[in-house]
Each structure stands twice: as C-alpha cells, then as structure tokens.
Image (spheres, rainbow, N blue to C red):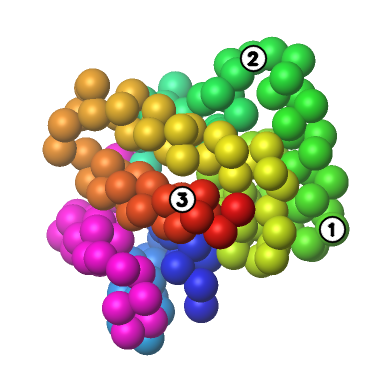
C-alpha cells in the first residue's frame, strides 16, 4: 500500500483496531516512508484509548477544527477560486473512482487517495499542496504544541516535497 494511502486511512474517524492495522501495513513498507514520523504518530495515537482518539480527532479535524483539513480552504478561504479548484478535483476524483464519503473534494483524505492513484496529479494541486499542509500544521501548532496530528502533518509534508520534485 502506498504511503499516501496509509496517511489517508489515518485521517478516518477512529475505530477499534485501526491503529494496529495501520502499524501492520506500515511495517510491510520496509522503510518506504522515508522517516519515522508517521510511525511516531501511530505510536502516540495507539497510546490513547479509543474514546481519547475520538475526542482528539474531533477536536483536531472535525466540527470546529483546530486544523481545517481542506486544501483549497487553506489556500483561498471561502472564495470563487476554491470553488473552481474543488470542481477540478471533483472531476479527477470521479475519474479515479474515489469515494468522497461525504467530504468535499478538497478534504485532505480524498486528496491523499487521489495523489496515491494519479500518475499525473492536477498541477494546481501539486502547486499548493505543500503550502496547504504547512498552513494546517501551523494552525494546529499555535493552539496545541503536543497534538499527535502534528506528526501526521509532518509525514504528509515530507511526502508533499517528493510531489514537488516529480512535478
């Protein structure tokens, strides 16, 4: 399984055995993640009870999130440009048969799935992706310096750097 797809899985609402399953999949990558940041994220999350994982997820990424996980929103806010961006992403998601599962097309989870499947991702996404991840991380760090999701954003950011090189 692709590292980006695993990170997308980590952005799902917590469920029993989710972290253990991700550990198993990460161990099969034989160091392909390039660093231990994602594994460190999993270790910190695994140390929490399921209800603590749910509370952390909800506080960090859901409802009134500390780090809004929407790439277009991080770059353009609520604007016409974000709408155009989401329309282009929506087209790509359908083309690659990615189920948005009720999320907007600029949500980080389906975007990671898309990036793991598309050999030639939308140039406008590649152009803003790393900056959007940094904005999410910076927003979260201002309010919660020890939030484990900072590690997940760091791991995603490391993968984003490789996207820039390939683009």
**Location of residue 47 (image quadrant):** bottom left
> Quick check: 78 above or below 124?
above
Q: Which residues are magenta?
A: 29-56
Q: Pointer 1: what residue?
A: 95
Image mark count: 3
- Image point (38%, 34%), residue name: 134
Closer to the N terminus: mark 2 or mark 1? 2
Q: Residue 56's spot in the image, x, y percent?
A: 30, 40
Label 3 vs 2, first from the N-terminus: 2
Element at label 3: helix
Mark positioned earlier in the residue sequence (1 or 3): 1
Q: Tell me, for residue 5, which label it has, or none.
A: none
Reading the image, the residue beneath label 3 is 160
Density class for disc 1 (Cα within 10 Å; few <14, some 14-19, many ≥20) is few
Mark 2 lies on residue: 78
Q: Compared to 17, does 137 lie above or below?
A: above
- Judged by depth in the image, the label closer to the viewer, 1 or 3, is 3
């Amino acid at each position: 399984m692709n590292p980006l797809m695993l990170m997308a899985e980590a952005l799902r609402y917590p469920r029993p055995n989710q972290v253990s399953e991700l550990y198993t999949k990460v161990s099969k990558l034989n160091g392909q993640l390039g660093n231990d940041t994602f594994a460190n994220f999993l270790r910190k999350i695994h140390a929490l009870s399921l209800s603590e994982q749910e509370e952390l997820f909800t506080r960090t990424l859901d409802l009134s999130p500390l780090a809004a996980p929407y790439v277009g929103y991080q770059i353009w806010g609520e604007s016409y440009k974000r709408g155009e961006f989401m329309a282009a992403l929506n087209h790509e998601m359908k083309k690659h048969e990615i189920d948005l599962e009720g999320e907007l097309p600029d949500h980080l989870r389906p975007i990671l799935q898309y990036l793991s499947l598309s050999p030639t991702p939308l140039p406008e996404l590649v152009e803003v992706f790393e900056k959007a991840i940094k904005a999410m991380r910076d927003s979260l760090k201002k309010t919660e310096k020890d939030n484990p999701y900072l590690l997940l954003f760091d791991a995603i950011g490391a993968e984003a750097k490789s996207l820039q090189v390939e683009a």
